[in-house]
Image (spheres, rainbow, N blue to C red):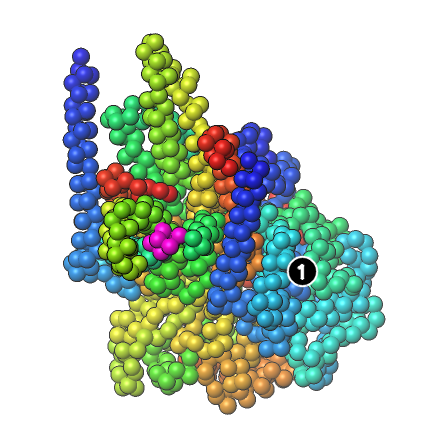
Amino acid sequence: MLTLVIRRLLAGVVVLWGAATLIFLIVRVAPGDPATVLLGPDAEPAQMAALRTRLGLDRPILLQYGDYLGRTLHLDFGDSYRLATSAMDAVVSRLPATVDLTLTSAVISVLAGLLLGSAAGIRAGSGQDRIVTTLTIVLQSFPTFWIGIMLILVFALGLRLLPTSGAQSLSSLVLPAVTLSFPFTAIVARVARSGIAEAMAEPYVQTALSKGLTPREVLTGHVLRNALIPVTTVVGLQIGALLGGAVVVENVFAWPGLGTLVVESVGNRDYAVVQAATLTIAAIIVLLNLLADLLYAQLDPRIRAAS
Amino acid sequence: MSITPCLRAAGLLTIALALSACSIGSGGGAGRNAAGQAIVASGTFVIDNIDPGSAQGGSAGKELAGQQIYGRLAKPDASGKLVPDLAEAWKPSADARSWDFTLRGGLKFSDGSPLTAEDVVASFDRLIQINGPYAANYKGVTAKAGSDTTVTFTSPAPDPALPGKLTTLFVLPSGVPADAASYFAKPVASGPFMVESFKPSAELKMVPNPNYWGGAPTVKSLTIRSIPDVAAKLAALRTGEVDVVWGVPDDQIPALRSDASLKVEAVPSNGNFTMWFNSGTPALKEAKVRRALWQAVDFGTIIKQLYPVTGQPADSPLAPTVFGYAPQTPIAYDPGAAKKALEEAGYPFDKPLRLQFGQAQFKPFLQAVVSSWAKIGVRADLLQKEQAVFIEDLLAMKWDVNFQLLGTAGYDAATNLGRLYPCAAKRTGYCNPDLDELLAKAGSATDQDERKGLYAQASRIIWDDAVGMFPMTSKVSYVWNENVSGFTLDALGYPDFSKATGSGN
Amino acid sequence: MTVVPAFLSGLVAARRARRRSGLVPAVVIGLYLLVAVAGPLLISYDPVRTPLEDRLLSPGAVTSSGGTAPLGTDALGRDVFAQVVYGARTSVLIGLTTVTVCLLVGVAIGCVAGYYRGWVDSVLTRLVDILQAFPGILLAIVIAGVFTPSLWVIILALSVTGWISFARVARSVVLSVRERYWVDAARLLGVRPRRLLGRHIMPFTVGPLVAMATLEFALVVLAEAGLSFLGIGLPASSVSWGQTVANGKEYLNSAWWISAAPGLALSVLVISVGLLGDTLTARYGRARSR
C-alpha cells in the first residue's frame, strides 16, 4: 500500500509540473503585453521598459520559467498585475465561494443520483430503468448556462422565490448549485444504477428476496451500502468536471468564485492569477483523483494485493 | 458578506472529502447595522487597488476609492469646475511655469498627525518614482514646499492646465514607500473616509474619518461593492442590500422608474463616443471621404433607440462640461449624398474597414453603425479586442476606425485635444500643421479666454476634417433608494459620499 | 383494474421504443443537418443589418418590413428565428470539424501508443494525465481567451483535450488486437508496422470510434456554446447559439425569448446526439470509457 501511495504521489507531482509548464507556455505565447494594460496608451517607452523590468518580463524566457517553477514550489505566484494582492491571495479569497458551490452541488447530485440510480437499478431492464437511463442522457445534455438562465426566468423572475444572482444570502446558492448538479446527477445515477443492478443479481440478495423481503428493504438494507463505493469514487474522479462546470455557472449567476476570477484574469492578461488559479484547480483535481484511487484500492482487495 | 459561515453551520461540509480544509473564509458576518445609516454603493468601476500611485489595477477604481479616502489639492465639482479641497487657493506665476498652492490651516491625517506641504511633496515624488500611468502627466514637473502650508509646482514649459492634472494627486503621509502593498490594507486617510476592510475587486468598506477637514461624514459606514452582473446589481438594489447604483444600462431604466421607492437620474459626463478614422489608411486619407462616412450613419436613430436615457447627440469633439468646448455644425444623416461623395472620391467599396473596440458594452452601438454603412455598400469588420491587444493595436495604428468612450481628464481640452491631435502624438494618422500651431499656442497661453478661443478653432478643424466621428456625449445614470440622499451625482461615476445621509430601511 | 393493462401497454411501448431507440434521435439530427445546410439558403439573415425600430419584438410580431418574426427579435431588431437557423450551421460546422480533428489526432496517437507500447506509451499517457488535470472547459477558456477570436482558435481550444477519448479507445483496441494470431502471422510474414496498423488493426477500431465520435460531437457543441456564452472564442460577426443566449441575458425580464429559443435548439440537438450515442455505444460497447 505504501509503495502505491508513493508511486501515485510521484505521478501527481509529475502531472502538476506538466500542468504548470503548459499554463506557463500558453500564457507566454499569447499576444498582448501586461505592461500595456497597466500603463495605458499614454505611456512613454522608457516607462514601459521600466515596468517590464520590474515585472521581470524582459528576462530570457528560460530564466523566467526557472524562476516561475522555483516560486511555484513555494506557492508563490507573484503579485497580481491588477489586484492589490498576491495572486495566491486572490485565489484563496475566491476559493471558499467555489468550494461552497461545488460541494452543495455534489451533495444534491449524490442524493438525486442515488435516488434515480436505485429506481433504475432495482429493476434492471424494466421500463422504469429505460426511462431513468434516458433521463440521465437528457440531464447530461442540457447546456448548464442555459438551464441556469431558464431557472432564473422561472424561479427568480417568474415566481420570485429566489434571488437572480449574486452571493448575498444562503438562498442565492440554491439556483447555481441546482444548475451545476444537472450533469453530475446523471453521472452519479449511471454509476449507482450499474452498481445496484449488479448487486441485485448477487446470490445473497436473491436469497433475501426469496425469504420474502421486499426489494426496497433489500435495497436499503444491503445493496445501497455496496453501491456507495463506486459512487464515492466517481465523486472524487469527476470533481474536475464539476469545477469546470462551475466556471460557466459562476458566470451565469455572478457567483464570486474561482471561475469568474479565471475569466476576468484571462481578459486582463493577469498572468500570475491565471497561473495560480488554474494550478490550484489542477492540484485539487490531482489530489482528489489520488484519494479516489487510494480509496478504491483500499476497498478492493484485488488492487491492494497487486501492489 | 461571504455565505461560507452559514454553510458551514448548515453542516454541509461534513461530506467534504479533502476540501473542507481549503474552506478559508473571512470571518464575515459584519452585515449592515440595524440602525441604518450604513450606505452600500455599487458603481461601474471595480476597485482592484487603493494605492493611488500604483500602476496596478484599473485607474477608474483607484480614482473612485481615492476620492473617498484621500484628499487632493483641488477637485472638480459636478460641472467640472475646480474647487478647493486640501488647498484653499492656487495661482500661477506670470509665465504659467509654476503654480503656488496654499493649504488649509490645521489639516490632519486620520491618525491625528498634521498634514503639511511636505506630505504633498512626498506624495507627488512617490507618484513620479513609481512611474505609473499618471506620471506621464507631469513630465519634468517638480514640487517644493515653501512652508508648512505652501507648495510650488514648477514645470519646464508653461502649463496652464496643471491644477486640473493635479486632481489625480492623492495625498498620503510622507514616508510611504513606493512598494507598500501591506500599507494599503489600512492606509492613513486624508479624505472623508478611512478604510475598514478591503477585498480587491470585491468590496471596500470605509468608516468616517474623524479628522476630515470638512467634518466627519454622518453615515455609519460606506461600502463600495463590485457587482459586475447588471441583473444582480439591480436585484440587490430592489432588496435594499445596495442603496446606490450607477452605470445602469438604458434598457433597464423604464422598469426602475416605475418603482416608487427608487430615484433615477442621468447626469452628463465629460466623455464623448470618439470614433477616429485612421487618416493613414489610403482610403481614408481625404477629409471628404471621412465626412461622407460620418454622414452615412444614422446616429440620431441609433442614439434614440439604444441610449434613450444616457445618450445626447454631441456637437463637438469635447463634451459640453469640458473647458474649451465650442459647439460645431451638426453633420446631418444623408446616405444618398454620402454614397455619391464616396463614389466620386473613388472609395474602395470592396475593402472592409477594420473597426476596433474594447469593451463588450459598446458592441450593439457599433453593430448599428456597421449596419448603417452596409446600407450604402460600405463594408466594415467589427473587431472586439482584449484590452492589452486593443492598446497595442491602437498605438501601432492597426485599425481603420477606432472606438473609445473618451473622457477628458481635469475637464480641460489640453488633456484631450492638446494630447491626442498634434502630428507628433501619432494617434489618428491625421497631421495638420495649422492644428499643431493652434494646439501648441493653446497649451502655453496663460489667458483663459485666449485658450478657449484657440481650442474652439482647433475643435472646428478636427470636426470639419472629420478626424473622427463624435456622435454622442454619454451620461451616467444613477439609481438610488429614496431614503439615501446628500451624495453627489458625479459626471464621471465618482460620487462624493462625504455629505451623504441615510434614514435606514 | 385499469392499472394492469396500462402497465402492460407501457411495457410493450418500451420494448418497441427500444427497438427503434436510435431512430427518433437520428431523424432529429438529420433535421438539424438539413437546417444547417439548407436553412441559410431558404431564410435570409444578415447579422450586420440592425433594424432598430424592430427591437425586442415578441414572438409572432410583425416587423416594420412587413414580415413576421416567429421567435421575436433581439435588442438590435434582428430576427431570433433566423439566428437559431444560422447558429445551427455554426454549431454543426464547429462540431464536425473539431470531432474530425480529434478523431484523426486521437486515432493516430492511440494506435502508435498501443502498437509500440514501451516509453512512447508512457510518455503519451503522462501527457494525457497532464491535460486531464484541468477541467476541459478551463483549458479551452484560457486558450481561446488569450488568442484573437476566430473559428480556428475555438477548434484548437476544443481539440486540445478532445482527442484524448479517441486515443484511449484506439489504444485499447490496438492493444487487444495486436496479440491475435493473425497479426502475429502478418508480422512474421514481414508486413511493415504502418501497413499492419492500417490494414489489419485499424478496421477493428471503427465501431467503437463511431460511437465515441457521436458522444464527442455532443460535448464539443456544448463546449462551443459555453465559450460563446462567455464571449470567448468566436469573432463578433459570427452567429452562434451561445452568443445569442448571452445577448438575451440582460433582457430576461422583458424579452425572455432571445435566450430561450437558441438554448432550446441547442438542448434538443445535444439530447438527440446523446441518445443516438447511447444506442451506438450499446451496440459497439467499449466507447464509454470516460
Magenta stretch, overall SS: helix
Q: Can you name the residue that lies furthest to the top here?
A: A211
Q: Position of B259 compared to B300: left or right?
A: right
Could you classify mark 1 by the number of other residues whose Cα lies within 10 Å: few (under 14), some (14-19), or many (20 or more)? many
- Residue at image position (71%, 55%) is B182
Figure check: C174 above or below A181: below
Q: Quadrant of residue A217?
A: top left
Q: Residue C208's spot in the image, x, y percent? A: 27, 46
| Left or right position of B430 against C10 | right
Residue pictured at 59% horizontal, 71% vertical: A60
Q: Depth check: give the residue in front, B4 or A295.
A: A295
Which residue in the structure is indicated by mark 1? B51
Compared to residue A21, the image places residue B297 above or below, namely below
Residue A203 in sight from this viewpoint: yes
The C terminus of chain B - image quarter: top right
**C137 above or below B280?**
above
User: Which type of secondary structure does the marked residue at label 1 adopt?
Assistant: loop
Chain letter belonging to callout 1: B
Q: Which residues are magenta?
A: C110-117
Residue found at x 73% / y 58%: B190
Query: In which quadrant is the N terminus of chain B drawn?
Result: top right
Q: Within the magenta stretch, is there residue C116? A: yes
In the image as oriented, which residue stretches furthest toward the right? Answer: B147
Q: Position of residue B20 (x, y in %)?
A: 58, 36
Q: How many marks?
A: 1
Q: Nearer the viewer, residue C251 or C155?
A: C155
Is A129 a magenta residue?
A: no
**Residue B205, percent from left and from top:** 64, 48
Query: What amino acid is labelled 1 in the image?
Result: Asp
In the image, is B373 to the left or to the right of B456?
Answer: left
Q: Residue B83 at what x, y percent from top left? A: 66, 66
